[in-house]
Amino acid sequence: MADNRALDNWDFLRTPRQDWPLRPVAERVGDWGEVHATRRLLPIVADQASRCMDCGIPFCHSACPLGNLIPEWNALVARDDWRDAAERLHATNNFPEFTGFLCPAPCESGCVLGIDDAPVTIKAIEAAVAVRAWEEAWECPRPPERHSGRSVAVVGSGPAGLACAQQLTRAGHTVVVYERDDRPGGLLRYGIPAFKMDKALLDRRLAQLVAEGTRFRTGADIGGAAGAGALLTRHDAVVIAVGATAARELPVTGRELAGVHQAMTYLTQANRVQEGDYAHPPISAAGRHVVIIGGGDTGADCLGTALRQGAASVVQLDIKPQPGVERAANEPWPVHARVHRVSPAHQEGGQLVRDGAVQAGDRTGLPGEDALRDVRVYSAATVSFDGDAQGRVTALRLADAEAGTRRALPGTERVIPVDLVLLALGFTGPEPGGLTAPFALRTTPTGAFARDAHYAGGRPGVFVAGDAGRGQSLVVWAIAEGRAAAACVDAYLNPDGTTTLPLPVAPTDRPMAL
């Protein structure tokens, strides 16, 4: 391996931050391809990696639940030693392309350089290294040298389930992943739009898992049509990694009207078009006046999808106040602060509004400049929906949300014409179903499945990983939990109760906060 000591220079003082270039808006909204200009990233990566200061105490490690060796692979990339950089990257992360394309990068919030300058572009460097590793065929299947004779069922094939399965397979156990959908991948498959992450990246990883020995059983609704109890007799351990897919509801008058849909229903159909299942999705934004309720990542995914489907107008409502562009006093470095961020989808919306290609919906109360800059409305509380005689939604009534309580302020109500409403309000936990009784699972007050310090929950041999136990979280936390749960399962299955697998996070660990 190449010498990975820090570079003897002061590049962080000489080289400004340069973000991953995006394709032109007019080009990318005309297709479903990756929004970034991937090939334009490679020439700038080495210079950006050289901005890393190789801190004595790298807070980027603590900000990342995987404990990624960020200064090490930054130094290697800066020296053009991509192969060793890929090795260091994969040492702590099974799927760096997933995090490189999808993670909001709390590691960058923890970058020491970010105290008084722009942080290192860690996420873009990670994505570049991951892509290069596949292009150069450095990332090959790693089947186990020996088999333990023990069998594990993993229920769910999202990032937590896949990471857990890969770790256990490589440790020598026979692993079968059960997925209720017709294709593996969970929300990576049907929840994340293709313009955020090319599904070829997912398919490539799945092929690697199969080559290593992991088996997949799709169309297996464990706890539903497929019995859950039989898993404990068929396998030596069971890992529940079904995610947190119970969508949060909006209990207001008119919710039952046609045209009001949960965001994940809409996104799944759009993704199925890209998979070839539909010529056209049953729910489409084409030619419609769209309102997205919810200001998070799922809402941004709906926005990008609606723009590509040809929405006539679109507005996104966020009940929270608009954050500032700088950290608030109660969210100092290295906390991953809530600041005003512009995702590629929001950039697209603003550009298309300025170009006159799409309307920004009702912008009552906003200055003209703000209306042209963003399609988002902040501090907006949805009061009710109106419908026509056929039971279809025709309007949304909203009001200003009171700071703190988020209650609708009297006298501020107005109406937005709408014929498609998408609810992107987050998730409350795993879906209630047939898993609880057969596995003796308990739920926490937040709606997640309870587990102990070793990820065990319910009957002996049952473990819970990912959002199913943590609640709605980030892809990087899901992968970290999958790796950690695998270590606990491995120790449970080994006669001496030990494991050599890494355990990056405990079930009680949380992101850095005050």
Image: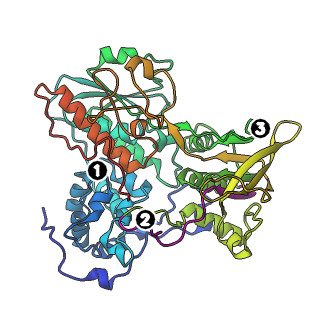
Q: How far apart are marks 1 and 3 (CA)?
A: 44 Å
User: For residue 167, what is the image quadrant?
Assistant: top left
**How many marks on residues?**
3
Q: How far apart are marks 3 and 2 (CA)?
A: 40 Å
Pick whichever of labels 1 and 2 is earlier in the sequence.
1
Residue visible at 68% across and 67% down in the picture: 352
* Residue highlighted by disc 3: 257
Q: What residue type is labelled 3?
A: Leu
Q: Indicate the secondary structure of the residue bearing disc 3.
A: loop
User: For residue 209, what is the image quadrant?
Assistant: top left
Left or right: residue 241 versus residue 306 is: left
Pick whichever of labels 3 and 2 is earlier in the sequence.
3
Foreground tag (3 vs 2): 2
Q: Residue 362 at x, y = what percent?
A: 77, 61
Check the picture and name the quadrant holding the C terminus.
Answer: bottom left
Pointer 1: residues within 10 angstroms few (<14), some, or many (20+)? many
Would you say residue 397 sits in the magenta stretch? no
Pointer 2: residues within 10 angstroms few (<14), some, or many (20+)? some
In this picture, is 470 found above or below 14? above
Pick whichever of labels 1 and 3 is earlier in the sequence.
1
Any part of residue 119 in sight: yes
Q: Indicate the secondary structure of the residue bearing disc 1.
A: loop
Q: Give the range drawn in magenta.
A: 311-334
Would you say residue 327 sits in the magenta stretch? yes
**Label annotation for residue 331:** 2
* Residue highlighted by disc 1: 93
Residue that protrudes farthest toward the left in the picture: 496
Residue visible at 31% across and 61% down in the picture: 129
Q: Which is more toward the observer, 152 or 247? A: 247
Q: Which amino acid does label 1 sit on?
A: Asn
Any part of residue 169 in sight: no
Q: Residue 465 at x, y = what percent?
A: 35, 36
